[in-house]
Image (spheres, rainbow, N blue to C red):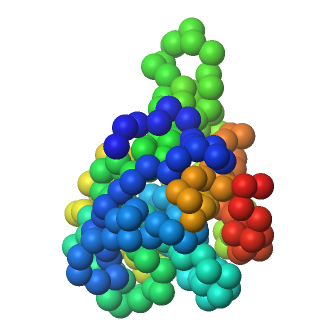
Amino acid sequence: MGDQKRPLQPGETAPAFALATANFDGTVSFADLSGRPFVIGFFRGLHCPFCRRQLEQLASVQPTLRAAGVETVAVINTPVERARLYFRHRPTPITLLCDPDCRTHRAYGVPHGEFLPEGSCEQPEWPYGATMAQFLAARINPTGELPEPLHPMEANTILNAKDGFELDEADNAIFANHATQLVGHFLVNANGTIGWVQIEALDGPNSLSIFPTAAEIIAAAGNPGH
């Protein structure tokens, strides 16, 4: 799988993949899913409380999507052993795949934020060449759970504490290596082409962790190519 510099767009061919599953032993490949449409979300690891919430939302819309003939798939960049332990206690009906190296995220072009060196004369371009000042100024409260908009790192800490989620060694390693990975949702049509795409925070860091609503996902699945 090659790295895409920009997110794949409707009409483009979806890359193949084969990834270990967190729900059960074994792997699931693109070939296993081909021939019918599926919604696939590429997330940060379990260390991200907003991603955990979005996985729950996907699980809530899964029956509606399945009734429409659309499968639901999620990819998290958490090692499979850690993910299996977590989801053994919090089962999910969606097909949950593990890609701790984010190779599939990059094959689909889900951005990985990069910061310009301090003092750089280059024009900032979020998220591919952002300034640290841009990120430090960000304030978010996408789920309304916080008392006020907070910096994303502070928001993560507060929500993880609220959830009783403690990062283990695997979580900390993923966070250290992939802290700036963004999230992307795609609809893959039955013919293997992209039908719809939504990428997190393309307009700036204040939109971090704002993901598609259940209604948006259902609408996209019902209107492939739009």
Q: Position of residue 213 (x, y in %)?
A: 72, 69
Q: Is residue 90 left or right of residue 171?
A: right
Q: Position of residue 29 (x, y in %)?
A: 35, 65
Residue occupying image coordinates x 67% and y 55%: 196
Q: Position of residue 151 (x, y in %)?
A: 60, 51
The quarter holding residue 124 reads: top right
Residue occupying image coordinates x 63% and y 15%: 123
The quarter holding residue 222 reads: bottom right
- Image quadrant occupied by the N terminus: top left
Q: Position of residue 192 (x, y in %)?
A: 53, 57
Q: Is residue 149 above or below residue 80?
A: above
- Image quadrant occupied by the C terminus: bottom right
- Count of residue discs: 0
Residue occupying image coordinates x 43% and y 77%: 95
Residue occupying image coordinates x 27% and y 71%: 27
Q: 91 or 2, which lies in front?
A: 2
Residue 14 appears in the figure: yes
Q: Is residue 71 left or right of residue 1?
A: right
Q: 222 or 122, which lies in front?
A: 222
Q: Is residue 81 left or right of residue 11?
A: left
Residue 97 appears in the figure: no
Q: 163 or 108, which lies in front?
A: 108
